[in-house]
Image (cartoon, rainbow, N blue to C red):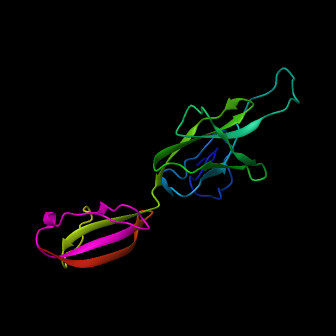
Amino acid sequence: MAAGAAEGSGCRRSPAAPPRTGRTTRPAADGSQVAASETVVAGGAYAFPDLGTDPEGVGDRPETRRVQVSVDDESFGSPRSAKLDESTGTWQAEVGRLSVGEHVLYARAVRDGTPSEVVRTAFRVTPDARVEWQVVDRNSPVDPAAWRPATGLDDWSFGLSTSAYGTGHKTVVARLVERGTETARDVVWVRFR
């Protein structure tokens, strides 16, 4: 999630040659999705702010350079430090596992206490998988807007009131959705009286 500092929430990317502009990040992964069971890893290219010349001749003092990453906190109240690879001009930070929902990663390069411009990248943590169900008249298509969540995943269940669906032949459809994609479906034909 940062190029001048962060790039790619949840996925590792091999950034192109980093622009040496002093910018901290390029939101290359803005809008990406990460499954809740995955560890979010951000990374990208970095460039440190130019501090100018040293008119007082202090010269050879130690210099600190780091990339800071913050999740959902643009004030960097508790920033994480990224690992820098000086040979490639890239950085990487393991952010950890985050709760399901929308998140924003902020990144900046800091040189001797002088931060670069902050760049933000929004991403979403999604549930790994869920079971959904619906009841339709026999031989009728499912309604994309009528899926209801079941309870559980490995051992799932749901309750329903048959009177809500009228009488006659019905199809109970259950599906497994993983990372937003239906990966399995099963049906049971029933008769409600």
Report the number of numbered marks: 0
Q: Is residue 41 left or right of residue 31?
A: right
Q: Residue at x 15, y 63 (%)?
A: 164
Q: Is residue 83 left or right of residue 9?
A: right
| x then y, percent, for residue 9 | 56, 52
Q: Is residue 21 left or right of residue 187?
A: right
| x then y, percent, for residue 51 | 74, 30
Quadrant into which the C terminus falls: bottom left
Q: Is residue 109 above or below residue 16?
A: above
Which of the two residues, 129 or 164, is positioned nearer the viewer here? 164
Which of the two residues, 164 or 80, is positioned nearer the viewer here? 164
Which of the two residues, 158 or 138, is positioned nearer the viewer here? 158
Q: Is residue 49 visible?
A: no
Q: Residue at x 64, y 44 (%)?
A: 5
| Bounds of the magenta segment | 147-176
Q: Is residue 185 visible?
A: yes
Q: Residue at x 33, y 76 (%)?
A: 186
| x then y, percent, for residue 39 | 59, 55
